[in-house]
Image: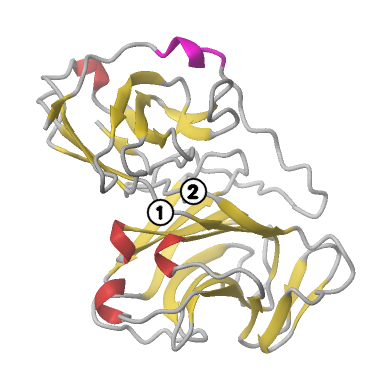
């Protein structure tokens, strides 16, 4: 077990910059912004974008296959008809444990509509959706499987009410060795994920998921789909500040150098170095240090007693070998 070095200011990251608003004219930004954390561990990010689609064309094309229902492109965005529908992406296969899907939701939905990330498609598949029922907001998340199958499997899944959002950017990914599905929502489209929700129990419920990926929907309009393939970097903190705490990182590359930083929650774009352009969820980061993962991609650190001024600050890790960003945790 390593002893966490005293925190030192990261001189190479002094210049802060906010993410610019989306330049895609088909994305309607949210007007109802919540600058608060959901209270759950948030901000999972998977490494290695391998495929994307901005739908800026007239027809769906040959890279997508209609598997059920009907999808089409309307106004340079992806639209689905009423009823459960899904399309599968050709040419991209990802182990469900490594799959990360991102997309933009249409703002102010009307009536029943949902968009789902489809991962692990094969004999079964994970169908993770964000849904609006009425009122111009998305108010539910479904941790489902199959084609909109909401039957709970063991300890996994269900249909849950969330803090309503009018739209925004959604990131859906796996952590904890394939056992936890995460949904992160950036309602403001500013690179900061204000809301996080998760469901565990995937491994016990689905022992033989496949590698297919796709998009599901019902009367939905979404845009700017992106698929990532890489182990999710995970960070946990045990113990209570200002007493010593233990910081554990998993999912890093074997023997990779991992930067761990802390600071107030917000958004920061790394301006230089091998991970230039990478966005982290800390407004003014200070470097705790660079640490080397073991052969399994794990790091365990124990801090000395912490100053009271550090309590409540956000901690996050960046794998310098592939620029994967971990979830955030709070001291």
Q: Which mark is residue 180?
A: none
Q: Nearer the viewer, residue 282 or 218?
A: 282
Q: Residues in magenta? A: 10-15
Locate the N terminus and report the quarter of the image it occupies: top left
Name the residue located 51 percent from the left edge and 43 percent from the top edge. 34
Q: Is residue 321 left or right of residue 312?
A: right
Judged from the image, the secondary structure of the residue bearing numbered disc 2 is loop
Q: Which residue is mark 1?
A: 231
Q: Is residue 198 magenta?
A: no
Q: Earlier in the sequence, mark 2 or mark 1?
A: 2
Q: Is 296 placed above or below 128 here?
A: above
Within 10 Å of the Cα at label 1, are there few (<14), some (14-19), or many (20+) other Cα atoms?
Answer: many
Q: In the image shown, does 260 or 170 lie closer to the viewer? A: 260
Say which residue label 2 marks: 47
Q: Residue at x 33, y 49 (%)?
A: 251
Indicate left or right for 219 with 303 as reference.
Answer: right
Q: Residue furthest right?
A: 58
Q: In x, y percent, where is residue 43?
A: 42, 46
For the point 87% across and 64% down, the residue is 57
Q: CA distance from mark 2 to mark 1?
A: 7 Å
Give the SS element for disc 1: loop
Q: Is residue 178 at least partly visible in the picture? A: yes
């Amino acid at each position: 077990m390593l002893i966490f070095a005293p925190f030192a200011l990261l001189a190479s990251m002094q210049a802060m910059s906010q993410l610019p608003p989306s330049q895609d004219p088909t994305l309607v930004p949210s007007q109802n912004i919540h600058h608060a954390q959901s209270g759950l561990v948030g901000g999972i990010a998977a490494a290695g974008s391998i495929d994307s689609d901005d739908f800026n064309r007239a027809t769906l094309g040959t890279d997508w296959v209609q598997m059920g229902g009907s999808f089409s492109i309307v106004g340079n965005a992806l639209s689905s008809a009423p009823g459960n529908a899904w399309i599968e992406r050709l040419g991209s296969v990802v182990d469900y444990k490594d799959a990360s899907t991102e997309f933009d939701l249409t703002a102010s939905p009307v009536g029943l509509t949902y968009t789902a990330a489809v991962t692990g498609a094969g004999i079964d598949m994970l169908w993770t959706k964000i849904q609006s029922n009425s009122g111009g907001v998305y108010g539910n998340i479904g941790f489902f499987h199959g084609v909109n199958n909401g039957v709970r499997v063991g300890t996994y899944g269900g249909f849950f009410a969330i803090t309503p959002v009018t739209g925004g950017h959604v990131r859906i990914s796996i952590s904890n060795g394939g056992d936890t599905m995460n949904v992160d929502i950036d309602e403001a489209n500013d690179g900061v994920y204000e809301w996080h929700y998760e469901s565990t129990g995937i491994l016990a419920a689905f022992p033989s998921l496949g590698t297919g990926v796709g998009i599901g929907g019902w009367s939905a309009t979404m845009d700017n789909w992106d698929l990532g393939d890489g182990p999710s970097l995970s960070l946990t903190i045990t113990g209570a500040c200002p007493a010593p705490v233990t910081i554990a990182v998993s999912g890093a590359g074997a023997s990779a150098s991992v930067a761990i930083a802390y600071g107030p929650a917000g958004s920061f774009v790394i301006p230089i170095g091998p991970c230039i352009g990478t966005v982290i969820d800390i407004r003014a980061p200070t470097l705790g240090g660079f640490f080397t993962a073991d052969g399994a991609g794990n790091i365990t650190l124990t801090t000395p007693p912490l100053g009271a001024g550090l309590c409540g600050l956000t901690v996050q890790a960046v794998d310098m070998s592939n620029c994967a960003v971990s979830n955030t945790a709070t001291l």
